[in-house]
Amino acid sequence: MFVIVLCVFFGLLLLGAPIAFVLGLTGISHLALMSFDYFSVIPQRMFAGINITSLTCIPFFIVAGELMNGGGVTRKLLDFVMEVVGCIRGGLAYCTIFTAALLSAILGSSNAVSSILCNVMIPDMEKTGYDKEFSGALIAAAGMLGPIIPPSTTFIYYSVLTGCSVKMLFMAGIIPGILIALAYCVVVRVYIRKHDLPRVFDRISLRRLLWSFVQAIPALLVPVVIVGGVMAGIFTPTESGAVACFIALIAGLIYKSLSLREIPQMLLRAAKSSASIMFIIACGNIIGWSMAVDGIPVMIQNAILSLTSNYYVIIALMLVILIIVGCLMESTAAMLIFSTVFLGLATAIGMDTLHFGLVFCLMLVLALVTPPVGMTLFVTANVAGLEVRSISKAIIPFVGAAFLVIALIAYFPSLALCLPRLFLGYGTV
């Protein structure tokens, strides 16, 4: 039976079916092989998968991103970062990474961060002498920071599935996001030395720096309000998303670059993006439920524990399995299917649940930029006008750097848990 279900899953993937239909039809075929009595609950399971209050923050974050991009907020952030790092050799590349980190603290989405930076950065990088493939790979990799640096839709969805504290996940994601950004800077440094790329300008102008900072203040307030509000317990993630939309709207009006006539189109694009995410979650809930009914998570857990019970070996096995899963599956689908499997395994070996949740989410975020199914790769290639094959080759150093950071966090949990312990009292009685 399990072999037939796998054949259905991979057959649909090879045929190029949308991931939502792959998950839904695979789940339905699994239920059919078990019993037709389960068919009556399929609509109920789909609705139950999205009938969760915490998921309502996702549309708000998408709308905030649309308002920021249309209102010129992104440009102000970019100008400020450029003034800070533009005097460094290869400053455009560093500017891309740091701007992505700032946008990540606003949007929480890799695709949103990557698509915005493609339109803004690639033309300038080409004029300065960067290869277009490297530029696209850098932007796709930098987009990976979106679901890591809080607020993160990936962390929110994981908390919905497992009950893990989203506040703790947000705090734990800060240091990994910074470390991955620094690892990217090392890759960029090697590339810059090899190609002898120029500075944007020779020296920092204090006057320009202060002026760009003043102009960027409304934009910089957005992540402060979102993350600070959630961490302080003032807002729920959904409320913070709504407040972010309001601040992004006001910032666009302050910059006088937001056209009120374009708002309906922005809302329409946000509605389409939100609907596609919710449909994937709804269909994925079918296969997640069918696996739970059939006891597959327990079977996988027992199979791995029968091979070894060594803490470090099992962590290595989880990382290897997740990188393979990430190469073949979309991250939301993978989270639906494997969160229960690996959470039980992590609990069995005594791994801290917050630490596991962070590592699990980081590995699935890495899947966004790993070929052949990396969603952010496709978005970046499409917006930048590149072939996925060429950008996949150029992104390998960035994927390697990010994987090394995640492996370091997996084996040294204090790197990620120090901030939740220090500021939120995690682990104290």
Image (tube, rainbow, N blue to C red):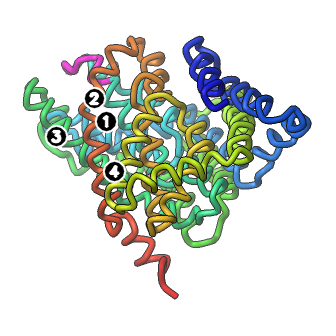
Q: Residues within 10 Å of mark 2 (few under 14, many from 20)?
A: some
The disc, 3 or 2, on the residue closer to the chain's N-terminal end is 3
Q: Which stretch is magenta?
A: 128-135
Residue at the spot of label 1:
399
Q: Nearer the viewer, residue 268 or 342?
A: 342
Cα distance in 3D space between marks 1 and 2 = 5 Å
Residue 415 image-quadrant placement? bottom left
Q: Residue furthest front?
A: 306
Q: Position of residue 149 (x, y in %)?
A: 44, 52
Amino acid at the residue labelled 1? Val
Give the side of residue 125 with respect to residue 328, left or right.
left
Amino acid at the residue labelled 2? Ile
Query: Disc 1 on helix, strand or loop?
Result: helix
Task: Please report the residue visible at 21 percent of the width from the left and 39 percent of the height from the top.
Answer: 86
Residue 260 shows in the view:
no
Cα distance in 3D space between marks 2 and 4 = 20 Å
In the image, residue 129 lies in the stretch drawn in magenta: yes
Q: Which is the main secondary structure of the residues drawn in magenta?
A: helix
Residue at the spot of label 4:
316
The disc, 3 or 1, on the residue closer to the chain's N-terminal end is 3
The disc, 4 or 3, on the residue closer to the chain's N-terminal end is 3
Q: Position of residue 71 (x, y in %)?
A: 56, 35
Callout in the foreground (4, 3): 4
Residue at the spot of label 2:
396
Cα distance in 3D space between marks 3 and 1 = 27 Å
Q: Position of residue 123 (x, y in %)?
A: 33, 19
Quadrant location of the N terminus?
A: top right
Residue at the spot of label 3:
87
Task: Please report the residue visible at 50 percent of the width from the left and 58 percent of the height from the top.
Answer: 345
Badge 1 vs badge 2, beta-carbon distance below 8 Å: yes
